Amino acid sequence: MIVAGVAIYTISHWIERGEAYEPLDLAHEIERLHASGCRNINLVGGEPTPWLGQWFKTFKHVNANVPIVWNSNSYYSADSAALLAGFADIYLLDFKLGPS
């Protein structure tokens, strides 16, 4: 049990230092990844909605036809859902609770 507890603690407190990108630079990186075999772009983060404006700014510069996966905990608004219509190709929603 202690080993499992350590593993859970390690995973839940794992911090990765990412790189900051401007939308145009990120668009170029997306195109580079797509050209090297990346099959989709998975937008995730627990809830990617706070970054929705940045995603739109980025993808207006992406010329590659790469599917966009909206990987969400489903806590976004109806207004956000309307904005996503026609933007996201795949919705990967994490349902934690439902009837029965």
Image: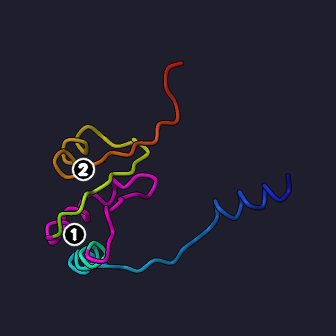
**Relative height, residue 81 to residue 3 (above, below):** above
**1 or 2: mark nearer the eye:** 2
Residue 93 falls left or right of residue 31: right
The C terminus sits in image quarter: top right
Toward the viewer: 21 or 33?
A: 33
Where is residue 68 shown, x and y percent of the image?
27, 57
Location of residue 85 (image quadrant): top left
Residue at image x 41%, y 52%?
Answer: 47
Q: Which residues are magenta?
A: 35-63
Q: Is residue 60 magenta?
A: yes
* Sooner in the amino-acid sequence: mark 1 or mark 2: 1
Q: Is residue 74 magenta?
A: no
Three-letter amino acid code of the residue under disc 1: Thr
Toward the viewer: 13 or 39?
A: 39
Where is residue 71 shown, x and y percent of the image?
39, 51
Where is residue 97 shown, x and y percent of the image?
52, 30
Mark number, residue 58 = 1
Toward the viewer: 66 or 50?
A: 66
Three-letter amino acid code of the residue under disc 2: Asp
Residue at image x 32%, y 72%?
Answer: 37
- Find disc 2 in the rendering and name its residue: 89
Where is residue 72 shown, x and y percent of the image?
40, 48
Q: Residue furthest front?
A: 37
Q: Residues within 10 Å of mark 2 (few under 14, many from 20)?
A: some
Q: Residue furthest right?
A: 2
